[in-house]
Image (cartoon, rainbow, N blue to C red):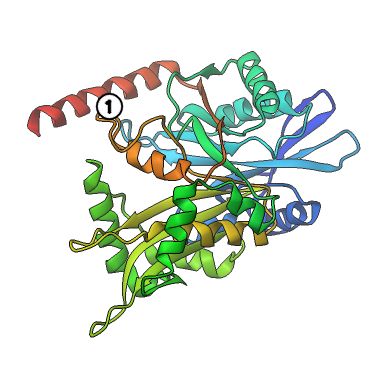
Amino acid sequence: MSANHLLATVQGFKVSSVRETDRDRAEQAIAHAGLPLPLNDLSVWHRAGPGPASVLCLIRDDADQLRGAFAVQRYPSNALPLHSILRVEHLGESVPAGAEPAVAMALRQLARRARRVLRVVVELHDRDAARRARIGAALAAAGFSRRPDVRMYEHTLAIDLTLDEQALLSTFSSRARRELRRAEKFPLTVVEVDGTVQGAVLDALLAETFERTGGMAPAQDWARIAAVTREAPTRLRQFGVMLHEEGTEPRLVAFARVIRHGTFAVYETAASTRLADRRIPMMYPIIWAILRWARETGLAWFDFGGVTTGTAETSDDPVGGISEFKRNFGGEVVQVGEDWSFDAAPMRDRLATSLSRAVAAIRRRES
């Protein structure tokens, strides 16, 4: 997949893959053109470890002008050894109008040229419904099928970052503004978090938070995440809250990670502890720090990382309380996510699916 190939030419747009040796130069051209590429499409993301290796694809018009880009990641299949899944994440605003058919055909070509590919999965992530519809129509015409479920999330809370700070603050609920004022009365400070130093504490906070919702905290490579922060400081940040109590060492009691994708930032990971003797609004000052950072970085809006309609009292929604917390910061609930897939090897893909279901059934019986 690393060869430099013309993958598709459709309706005046050309899509080509980039040789790995030319990748840094291509990314510099993308940045110079101001194209809104997600962080997970950049080489810094997989060089530091959080994501797999990927192939960068460039979109040019009939005048050979660079108009867009996207990256295709290759994940190993968990069910079928030596086979893989091609995945495009956060596809949306980096695809110019009119280039959608060329992008869809290029993805099919990549699946044909790469060995042992079971399927191609395209995860649209775009609040622009018209652009999402254009991309979806092109994928459908190229033989992709829309998946019934979205791997990440379908709806999110979008917060307008073009407002000035006071106007933005005025969109918060009265509770959020009150909790921000209340947080100022406690010995709290918002700091930037370096996982290479505080990794064990971050792991403990994550484990406690996921336990509250009945989940298991995903493993984190804090050193590699810190490496991305150092190399791309306008792309990734981690903020934490330190609690300073008399007679004890300051301790980290909450943190959150924010990632910039194109023209927006995403609330990506967060965790906090709960104190036995009192309730302190630890996450409110962190969110305010994140929103201010995103504004200062020049982003247009903030994606709160998915939202449901539940509340803290909703029994069948394990993240209802988290969604209620997010809604305190105003914003607008919008659809952003759609998942599409193309079966590159239908028989082997069905075999892999059957094997995965069998393994899952065995694990359920053993648990």
Label 1 residue SS: helix
**Nearest to the observer: residue 298 or residue 95:** 298
Q: Amino acid at mark 1?
A: Ser
10 Å crowding of disc 1: few (<14), some (14-19), many (20+): some
What is the quadrant of residue 158 in the picture?
top right
What is the quadrant of residue 118 in the picture?
top left
**Nearest to the observer: residue 268 or residue 162:** 162
Q: Position of residue 240 (x, y in %)?
A: 41, 66
Q: Residue furthest right?
A: 63
Task: Answer above or below: position of 260 versus 76.
Answer: below
Determine the residue positioned at 60% across, 25% down: 108
Q: Position of residue 148 (x, y in %)?
A: 44, 18
Instruction: Report whether residue 115 is seen.
Output: yes
Q: Position of residue 24 (x, y in %)?
A: 67, 59
Q: Position of residue 246 (x, y in %)?
A: 26, 83
Q: Is residue 132 left or right of residue 362?
A: right
* Residue at the disc numbered 1: 356
